[in-house]
Image (spheres, rainbow, N blue to C red):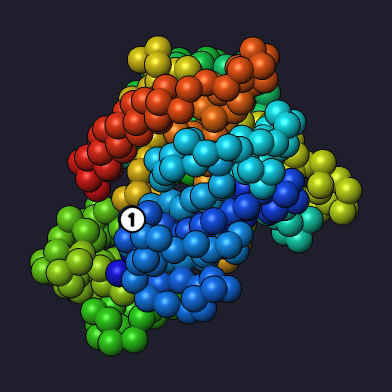
Amino acid sequence: MDYVIYFIITIAILVFVHEFGHFAAAKLCGMRADVFAIGFGKRLFGWNKIKGFTFGDLPKDFDGQGHTDYRLCLLPLGGYVKIAGMVDESMDVDFANKEPQPYEFRAKPVWMKVVVITAGVLMNLLLAWIIFWGRNFFQEKQITKTTSIGFVIPDSPADSIGFVAGDKILAVNGKSVDNWETLNEELFINTLGQDLSLKIERNGKVERISFPRSKIPDETTDRFLLPEGLSKPIIKGVLENSPAQEVGILTDDMLLKLNEIPVYSSSQVTQLIKKNKDKAINILLTRNRDTLDVAVTPNKKGEIGIYIGHDFTGEIDYQSHGFLEAFYLGWLDIVKMTNLTFTMLGKVIGGEIEFGKAFGGPVKIAQFAAQSADTGIVSFLYFLALLSLSLAIINILPFPVLDGGHLIIILIEGITKREIPVKVKIAIQNTGFVILLLLMAFIIYNDILTL
């Protein structure tokens, strides 16, 4: 239910912002917006100036007389604004056999049509920009002043590559790194889809380690490398009436071993616990310089009711930014993420990155929305900004049904000074809609397979 709730909240925010852009631009340009809908399909309830608040569908012959019907629909997978005189997802073309009216989309100049059709994308960009700005302005950025490895988990990907504790990483694919955040950015983001060559310092000598991209796990599934100065996993909280509380595990206990396996990271602890659902686990931990051995049995979900974290004893700096600087950095974040998106898209087309690792549908959105919300409002807002930017990028692509597809048609009509026949527009819309549905079905199927 958490996934469902956060998915609906996330989609509702993004759709409202996007569609409000179209709606506001249409109104400012003197066009009628007959419907403002969150969701698709059957009208659950809504409000308009003629009927007031009503449940269910409106009569088929309902005339809003220029007033908008604000409605919530059954399927929370998007939304739309129905602008008079425009061929859109509603496929309503009754206006085609009538003379164009001054308040219709088709009667307006090309520049107004362009403004209206791109306003949704601009609003999504604006939302992402504001959140990025706020993150840069209000939240200090942590800079972990080390690139030296503290732990290498036995039999882990890092171990198989040949890393050892004490290695200091100097550069990734030729890019120098001087802190842990920059190192992770180069490993997991800027070199996405590329094989890696790391320049390292080991025992006073400079060496090079090269390995294929496939050796690195997803950043979300495990910590690939652990920095020098990072403690072993520490209990940061214990849930009431949980298996952990029942056996006497306390906050600030440090975990050493699970079933005789040395543990180094929170993700490693989580994975070991989940593998032992309904089975007793022996945990070796330290408390106030004492070493204790406790046995705890995870519940059916593979949880024992603990929050796991780490303490860091190394040097940490905090970087803050002024109002205008944060505004500029927010725009740089948008440019950087946009470049990364198109780079990743190119690598997917070229077969360098698996489709499932690059794209996610409703299931993954629900997962990430719930996970980011669990870690705090800042994480949720950042996820929302990334999703809003992704929505803007996808929508501006020149594909039928999307805003980019509408924009291409508008520009063609503007250049040729002739309106494309309504039947042709409907055929383009239908083709695009079918392809989009098939793509969405494949993405959802892939989401389920990767659960």
Q: On the rendered structure, is 356 left or right of 383?
A: left
Q: Residue at x 46, y 71 (%)?
A: 46
Does dot 1 land on a helix, a strand or a loop? strand
How many tags in the picture? 1
* Residue 311 figure quarter: bottom right
Q: Residue at x 48, y 58 (%)?
A: 37
Q: Amino acid at mark 1?
A: Gly
Q: Residue 229 location in percent, x, y?
A: 57, 50
Badge 1 density bin: few <14, some 14–19, many ≥20, Cα 10 Å: some
Residue in front for this viewpoint, 31 or 253: 31
Q: Residue at x 40, y 72 (%)?
A: 45
Q: On the rendered structure, is 365 left or right of 64?
A: left
Q: Residue 243 location in percent, x, y?
A: 24, 79
Q: Which residue is mark 1?
A: 41
Question: Is residue 130 among the parts visible in the rendering?
Answer: yes
Residue in front for this viewpoint, 257 or 182: 182
Q: Is the N terminus in the top left, top right, bottom left or bottom right quadrant?
A: bottom left
Q: Of all residues shown, which one is farthest toward the left?
A: 279
Q: Is residue 108 depicted above or below 384 in this figure?
A: above
Q: Residue 289 location in percent, x, y?
A: 45, 73
Residue in front for this viewpoint, 253 or 91: 91
Question: Is residue 211 among the parts visible in the rendering?
Answer: no
Q: Is residue 207 depicted above or below 423 in this figure?
A: above
